[in-house]
Amino acid sequence: MTRVLTDVAEAASLLRAGELVAFPTETVYGLGGDARNARAVAGIFAAKGRPQFNPLISHFPDSDAAFEEVVPDERARELARLFWPGSLTLVLPRRASSRIADLAGAGLDTLAVRVPGHPVALELVRLAATPVAAPSANRSGGVSPTNAAHVMEGLSGRIAAVLDGGPCEVGVESTVLDLSSRGAALLRPGGITAEQIEAAIGPIGRALTRAAGEATQSLRSPGMMLSHYAPSLPVRLGAADVASEEALLAFGAPLPGAGAMWNLSPSRDLAEAAARLFAGLRWLDAEGRRLGLTRIATMSVPDRGLGAAINDRLERAAAPRD
Ligand code: TXA
Ligand code: MG
């Protein structure tokens, strides 16, 4: 039985006892476990059905705690100062002294660390008094959860509890930036935009973030599988028209004639669209199946700022599945 909690201290004591607890962050809900407890970390992979070569992000209450596990350089310190707490994950060389379980880092010599920008998440990781490993709290390959009900849909019965902190404000996952070698590389576009990062540390490599770069990219970010965020209905991108047997993910003025419609943002606001993306995919999927629709068609979203993260998720949702 998975419990729904609102008491942060209770959630923290479950984490300390090695249990798995889903919790809100500003991006998406995370599936948390004590990163130093190998059994808890193994449990995260099992609950999600996640391949073990895909490493997890560890979460901390502040940058000092994060930098006890990894070695920051000047760029990392500057980005932490500017964007933490917030939607940025840094991949850095792991310290020899780190007690984070090998499995959390998938055996790599780097670790992904982040200080989440949500008061409940910060309080939880502070009270847990241990790094908290947390992937998004969905079954592997599925759509990420942005409220507690989404978490229960996928993980009820598989984890001890979900800490309910309401809907997530950002709605897409953190930006993953690899600083483990000289050239900074954007491994996943997310809540902090590439433009914001470049304004702080100069040009970053981002050629590898799109589907075309998948083969090369997998060397550095083993977890960025092409098919991901997949609803059960197939997804058609960049729709210029829509059929009555399709469900429409609209942006701005909706195309007429769809069998069902979810508008990411009538006013074409990218932050609003990101916040409504995963809930929209879930709703269109459920509603589309209920009505016997055949597909989800998506209108195009500009590829700047948060639009890059939205398009990345939509391309993966539309990618061929195995
Ligand atoms: O917003 C987020 O980042 C959420 C919340 C819960 O914090 N977490 C999240 O975790 O999205 P997850 O596991 O779904 O995505 C983590 C990404 C994966 O693409 C993984 O491959 C990459 O980070 N990653 C983790 N450790 C890495 C490492 N050492 N080197 C390269 N990529 C890494
Ligand atoms: Mg995920």
Image (tube, rainbow, N blue to C red):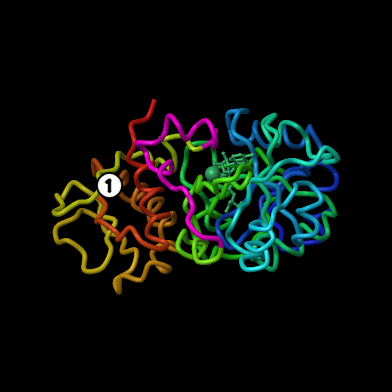
Which residue reaches farthest bottom?
A: 267
Residue 62 showing in the rendered view:
yes
Q: Is residue 215 magenta?
A: yes
Q: Which residue is mark 1?
A: 296
State which image quarter holds ligand 1: top right
Task: Look at 63% across and 46% down and name the residue there.
Answer: 91
Would you say the magenta stretch is mainly helix, strand or loop?
helix
Depth check: 294 or 216 in front? 216
**Number of marks:** 1
Q: Is residue 89 magenta?
A: no
Query: The N terminus is located in which quarter?
Result: top right
Residue 43 showing in the rendered view:
no
**Secondary structure state at the residue bearing disc 1:** strand
Q: Is label 1's Cβ within 8 Å of ligand 2?
A: no
Task: Look at 29% across and 56% down and name the residue there.
Answer: 249
Q: Is residue 219 above or below residue 290?
A: above
Q: Left of 259 or right of it: where is 92?
A: right
Q: Which amino acid is tagged 1?
A: Ile
Residue 207, position in %: x, y?
A: 40, 44
Q: Left of 298 or right of it: where is 63?
A: right
Query: The C terminus is located in which quarter?
Result: top left
Task: Look at 54% across and 35% down and name the residue there.
Answer: 220
Depth check: 32 or 305 in front? 305
Task: Please identify the quarter of the rendering in which residue 272 is found.
Answer: bottom left
* Region of the chain picked out in magenta, as a range: 201-223
Q: Left of 135 or right of it: where is 142?
A: left
- Mark 1 closeness class: few <14, some 14–19, many ≥20 residues within 10 Å: many
Task: Look at 49% across and 55% down and name the residue there.
Answer: 190
Q: Is residue 41 above or below residue 259?
A: above
Residue 163, position in %: x, y?
A: 68, 57
